[in-house]
Image (cartoon, rainbow, N blue to C red):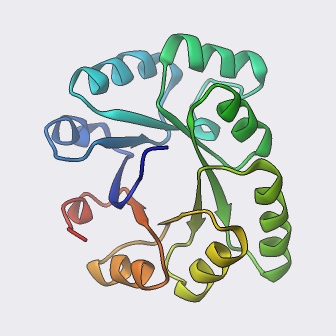
């Protein structure tokens, strides 16, 4: 399993695509991409030597059932998948893709329920949103043993450091001003 660490750029705005292609970042996370654009974007990123992680739940025009996932694997060929859904994580693991299960921190009961699901799905990484609660980052890592990526509401260099202080291995952000922060 490749190790994700540091600031992981999340492409939300296509105007930043060229910048990411020329950046030092080995990974690009695609968020909210239209299905019609996906193949060209992924192919272009891979030509530039980038690994591509797709947020499967947010690909506009794709149903993430077994058939939609088969299309992703055969035609788009991502390196990894992010999803909130356990079945998508399971499909990605069966296809030897890097897996990141996204969890929203909505309350203690939801957190405990999600930790149980993580135990069943065993993703490679967990992405916690919002990623600015160090004590919860530490708790989830201790309970699961899975590396944590902090995301959501990461707006300042101080937010990045706060996530690291809780034990996050990486921070995902669409804020291009934070992409070049060094750990």
Q: Is residue 172 left or right of residue 148?
A: left
The image shows a total of numbered marks equal to: 0
Determine the residue positioned at 16% across, 44% down: 23
Left or right, residue 95 beside residue 117: left
Image quadrant where one finds the C terminus: bottom left
- Residue 152 location (% of width, % of height): 50, 66
Q: Nearer the viewer, residue 13 or 160?
A: 160
Which residue is found at the position 24% from the left and 47% from the top? 25
* Residue at the extreme bottom: 135
Taking 63 as reference, is 170 above or below it? Answer: below
Residue located farthest toward the left when viewing the structure as drawn: 22
Residue 176 position within the rendered picture, expressed as x and y whole percent measured from the top left: 25, 57
Instruction: Say if 66 sits above or below 139 in the image.
Output: above
Q: Looking at the picture, how far across and down is residue 140, in whole percent?
A: 66, 75
Q: Residue 164, located in which quarter of the rendered image?
A: bottom left
**On screen, residue 173 above or below 38:** below
In the rendering, at what x and y percent does residue 181 appear? 21, 67
Left or right: residue 81 compared with residue 6: right
Q: Residue 22: name its quadrant.
A: top left
Residue at figure coordinates x 40%, y 34% from the top left: 52
Kindly indicate the quadrant of the structure image that contains residue 13.
top left
Residue at the extreme top: 75
Q: Residue at x 29, y 33 (%)?
A: 50
Residue 150 vs residue 57: left or right? left
Q: Is 37 in front, or is 74?
A: 74
Q: Nearer the viewer, residue 34 or 7?
A: 7
């Amino acid at each position: 399993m490749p190790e994700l660490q540091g600031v992981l750029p999340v492409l939300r705005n296509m105007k930043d695509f060229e910048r990411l292609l020329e950046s030092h970042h080995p990974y690009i996370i695609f968020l909210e991409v239209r299905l019609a654009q996906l193949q060209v974007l992924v192919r272009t990123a891979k030509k530039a030597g980038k690994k591509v992680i797709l947020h499967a739940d947010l690909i506009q025009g794709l149903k993430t059932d077994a058939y939609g996932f088969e299309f992703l694997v055969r035609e788009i060929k991502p390196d990894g998948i992010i999803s909130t859904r356990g079945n998508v994580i399971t499909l990605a693991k069966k296809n030897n893709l890097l897996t990141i299960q996204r969890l929203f921190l909505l309350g203690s009961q939801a957190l405990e329920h999600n930790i149980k699901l993580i135990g069943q799905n065993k993703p490679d990484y967990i992405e916690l949103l919002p990623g600015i609660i160090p004590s919860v980052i530490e708790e989830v890592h201790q309970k699961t043993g899975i590396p944590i990526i902090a995301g959501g509401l990461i707006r300042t260099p101080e937010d990045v450091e706060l996530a690291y202080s809780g034990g996050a291995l990486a921070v995902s952000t669409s804020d291009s001003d934070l992409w070049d922060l060094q750990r």
